[in-house]
Every structure is written in structure tokens, then in C-alpha cells.
Image (spheres, rainbow, N blue to C red):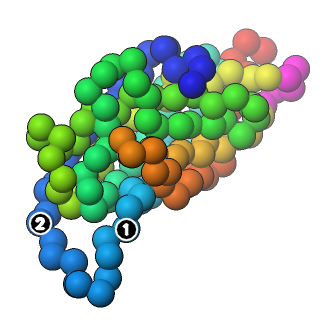
């Protein structure tokens, strides 16, 4: 887990739902996520953070870590080979097992241009890992346009 110590704002809103699973249908072990909102999708280089709202669902409720040095949300800029990692605080009280769903907000620091052009495009991919190490599905944002603001 490299380079995740930059400015990150993650907030959580948990909705606890005690849902009974059918005896012949085991609850999924891995968390599930979906992108609800990404804005802005046109940004000036080094100017504006990108606000992302993710929906999550987890049958065991073991999302997030109490240790702020432990990161469980992987974010990848499609232009880069390395991932950024974000800390997600525990989303259940006292880390008890509950079937939970809700949304949380991630602030991606301002993007930059890699090349010499006047603009570039990228997408952001997200994957959440629970405390047992189970990976969620991977979701990818719509295309984000980065404009050169220095020309």
C-alpha cells in the first residue's frame, strides 16, 4: 500500500438493516460497491478535488478499520500503474456483524497532466476490501477530462 497519506476526506453514513437470509442462500462474503456520483468530470490540472459518492453493501458489516494507518479502499487513476489507498473507518458499532448498506464520500485530490498536451482523460477505479481481506467488485467512473490551466 503506497502513497495513500495525501489529503483524504472519507465520511461514512451507515444504514443498518437486519435482513434475514434464506437458509439455502448464504450471504455474500465480499462487500459490494457502486458509484453513485462523480463531480466534477471536467477539471483544471491541480485545481479542484473530485468528489465521489460510493454505495456499499456488506452482509457481515466488516468494512473499515479502526487503525487510521490501515487503508481498505483502493483507487486507481487509469493513467498510472500505482494505486492510491484510502482509510475507511469502521462502519459498524463495536465492529459487530451486521448486514449493512449505505454510502460514503471520497475526496480525490486535484488531478494533474502527465504529458505535454493541453488536456488528458482518465477514469478512476475503486475496490473496497473488508477486514477479512475479501475484495469487492471493482467499479470505474465515467471519463474525467483534465485541462491544462497554465497555458
| Residue 109 % position (x, y) | 52, 22
Q: Residue furthest right?
A: 116
Dot 2 falls on a residue whose secondary structure is loop
Dot 1 falls on a residue whose secondary structure is loop
In the picture provided, is 134 more to the left or to the right than 20? right
Q: At x 53% / y 45%, what residue is drawn?
A: 126
Q: At x 63% / y 31%, what residue is drawn?
A: 83
Q: Are marks 1 and 2 in contact (CB under 8 Å)?
A: no
- Magenta span: 115-119
Label 1 vs label 2: CA separation?
Answer: 15 Å
Q: Nearer the viewer, residue 37 or 138?
A: 138
| Residue 65 % position (x, y) | 31, 32
| Residue 55 % position (x, y) | 35, 54
Q: Quadrant of the N terminus?
A: top right
Residue 128 in sight here: yes
Q: Quadrant of residue 95?
A: top left
**Most frequent secondary structure within the magenta stretch:** loop
Number of numbered markers: 2
Q: Which residue is mark 2?
A: 18
Question: Residue 69, relative to residue 42: is it above or below?
Answer: above
Residue 117 among those drawn in magenta: yes
Q: Nearer the viewer, residue 9 or 16?
A: 16
Q: Which residue is mark 1?
A: 28
Of badges 1 and 2, nearer the viewer stands 1
Q: At x 36% / y 41%, what residue is drawn?
A: 131
Q: Quadrant of the C terminus?
A: top right
Residue 32 among those drawn in magenta: no
In the picture provided, is 131 more to the left or to the right than 1? left
Q: Quadrant of residue 11?
A: top left
Amino acid at each position: 500500500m503506497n502513497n495513500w497519506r495525501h489529503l483524504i476526506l472519507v465520511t461514512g453514513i451507515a444504514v443498518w438493516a437486519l435482513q434475514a437470509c434464506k437458509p439455502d442462500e448464504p450471504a455474500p462474503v465480499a462487500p459490494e460497491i457502486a458509484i453513485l456520483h462523480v463531480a466534477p468530470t471536467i477539471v483544471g490540472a491541480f485545481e479542484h478535488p473530485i468528489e465521489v459518492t460510493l454505495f456499499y453493501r456488506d452482509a457481515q458489516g466488516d468494512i473499515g478499520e479502526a487503525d487510521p494507518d490501515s487503508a481498505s479502499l483502493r483507487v486507481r487513476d487509469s493513467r498510472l500503474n500505482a494505486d492510491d489507498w484510502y482509510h475507511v473507518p469502521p462502519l459498524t458499532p463495536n465492529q459487530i456483524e451486521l448486514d449493512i448498506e449505505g454510502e460514503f464520500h471520497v475526496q480525490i485530490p486535484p488531478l494533474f497532466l502527465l504529458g505535454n498536451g493541453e488536456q488528458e482523460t482518465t477514469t478512476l477505479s475503486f475496490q473496497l476490501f473488508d477486514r477479512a481481506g475479501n475484495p469487492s467488485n471493482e467499479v470505474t467512473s465515467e471519463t474525467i477530462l483534465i485541462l491544462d490551466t497554465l497555458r
